[in-house]
Amino acid sequence: MPAISDALELLTAQHEQIEDLFEQVRQIGDEAAFVELADKLSNHLALEHELFYPAIAAHLSAPVLDELCAEHAAIKQILAELSFMPIRSASFRGKLNELGNLLFGHSAWQEDELFTAIAEAVEKDELARLCDRFYHFDAPAIAA
């Protein structure tokens, strides 16, 4: 049985993991940490896009859903650009700061507003079933 059984708690835990990896890359320029960050972030965005957003779409306005998808696209674009830059370069640092601004703003809004609204609108057992779907979507990435 997975340790986390609520979809919102799992997404929050992923945010924390991604933010920790981001800080590791930012502070020490660790290439292995960047590869792990890119993998975890890509998996997290896919999970949100493929499972979470469709599951909560009835509780979101079209403009909010459009904004979330636009943020995902921007994060993916910057991540792709970073993948082709030397990790110790000034251009990498600038792009990494851009990524950080997007990531921290995106996750803060989700945790402070979106997750609160969804927790009030969606039954606990539905969040548990959604969490189970998350584990089946990408169990190795979630467990790591």
Image (spheres, helix red, strand yellow):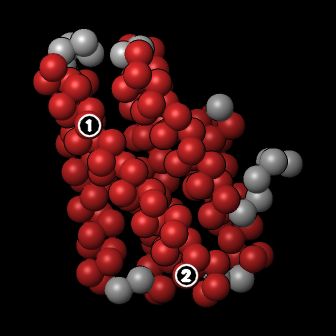
Left or right, 16 with reference to 88:
right
Left or right, 34 with reference to 59:
left
Amino acid on which the number 2 mark rests in the picture:
Ala
Mark linked to residue 117? 2
Instruction: Look at 44% across and 79% down and name the residue there.
Output: 57
**Residue 117 picture location, percent across and down:** 55, 81
Circle 1: element type = helix
Left or right, 124 with reference to 46:
right
**Residue 18 picture location, percent across and down:** 49, 39
Which image quarter: residue 88? top left
According to the picture, the residue beneath numbered tag 1 turns out to be 97
From the viewer's perspective, is residue 85 above or below residue 58? above
Which image quarter: residue 26? top left
Q: Quadrant of the C terminus?
A: top right
Q: CA distance from mark 1 to mark 2?
A: 29 Å
Instruction: Look at 62% across and 64% down and name the residue there.
Output: 8
Crowding around mark 1 (Cα neighbors within 10 Å: few <14, some 14 to 19, many 20+) is some
Mark 1 near mark 2, Cβ–Cβ under 8 Å?
A: no
Residue 50 appears in the rendering: no
The one nearer the camera, 139 or 93, is 93
Query: Of the residues under marks 1 and 2, which one precedes in the sequence?
Result: 1
Mark linked to residue 78? none
